[in-house]
Image (cartoon, grey):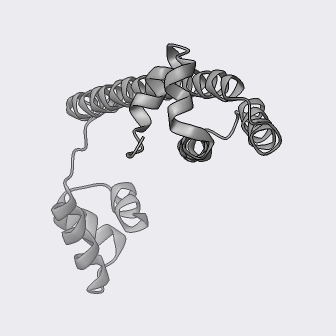
């Protein structure tokens, strides 16, 4: 054949068309093997746990160099493509599961944020503050201006204990 047609070769390998594959010749079959190996090798980098398939590919490479039996090459090419397809399907399934988990995590984080906002709006338990921050600042300023606890308490009409508490803050 004048032109190397990889897809056509794979179809012939699947159909076990020995006569059609013989037309390609050993050089083209070797090139098909290398293409499949490279394709599988790229996938192996993404999914490094397929040591058995890697061993088989290396074994096929040795057999290719030692044996010129095209039927062996045909069946091996078909097996490699099947294994690669299964690997790609498994990778796609894992990617789908990963996307689903990411969506679930996103929804959970969004729900947590909503609950935190609601919790912030819920009144706190215990006695509410009687004096605001501005009042506390005024008491501190008055005391620091040189007045005693008792003078500060009488000026703001609060107890000396309250003055003491404000100064500790």
Q: Residue at x 51, y 37 (%)?
A: 24
Q: Residue at x 54, y 43 (%)?
A: 28
Q: How many marks?
A: 0
Q: Residue at x 56, y 15 (%)?
A: 16
Q: Foreground: 30 or 39? A: 30
Q: Is residue 47 left or right of residue 56?
A: left
Q: Is residue 151 left or right of residue 46?
A: left
Residue 98 image position (x, y, % from top left): 44, 29
Quadrant for the N terminus, please.
top left
Q: Foreground: 100 or 43? A: 43
Q: Foreground: 24 or 30? A: 24
Residue 71 image position (x, y, % from top left): 67, 22
Occupied quadrant, residue 119 = top left
Residue 147 image position (x, y, % from top left): 29, 80
Q: Residue at x 49, y 28 (%)?
A: 88
Residue 12 image position (x, y, % from top left): 48, 21
Occupied quadrant, residue 120 = top left
């Amino acid at each position: 054949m004048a032109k190397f047609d990889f897809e056509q070769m794979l179809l012939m390998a699947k159909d076990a068309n020995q006569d059609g594959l013989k037309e390609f010749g050993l050089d083209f079959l070797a090139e098909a093997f290398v293409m499949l190996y490279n394709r599988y090798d790229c996938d192996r980098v993404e999914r490094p746990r397929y040591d058995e398939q890697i061993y088989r590919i290396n074994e096929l490479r040795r057999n290719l160099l030692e044996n010129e039996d095209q039927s062996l090459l045909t069946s091996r090419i078909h097996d490699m493509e099947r294994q690669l397809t299964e690997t790609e399907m498994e990778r796609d399934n894992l990617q789908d599961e990963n996307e689903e988990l990411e969506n679930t995590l996103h929804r959970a984080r969004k729900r947590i944020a909503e609950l935190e906002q609601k919790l912030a709006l819920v009144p706190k338990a215990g006695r509410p503050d009687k004096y605001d921050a501005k009042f506390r600042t005024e008491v501190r300023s008055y005391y620091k201006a040189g007045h005693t606890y008792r003078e500060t308490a009488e000026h703001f009409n609060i107890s000396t204990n309250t003055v003491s508490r404000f100064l500790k803050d």
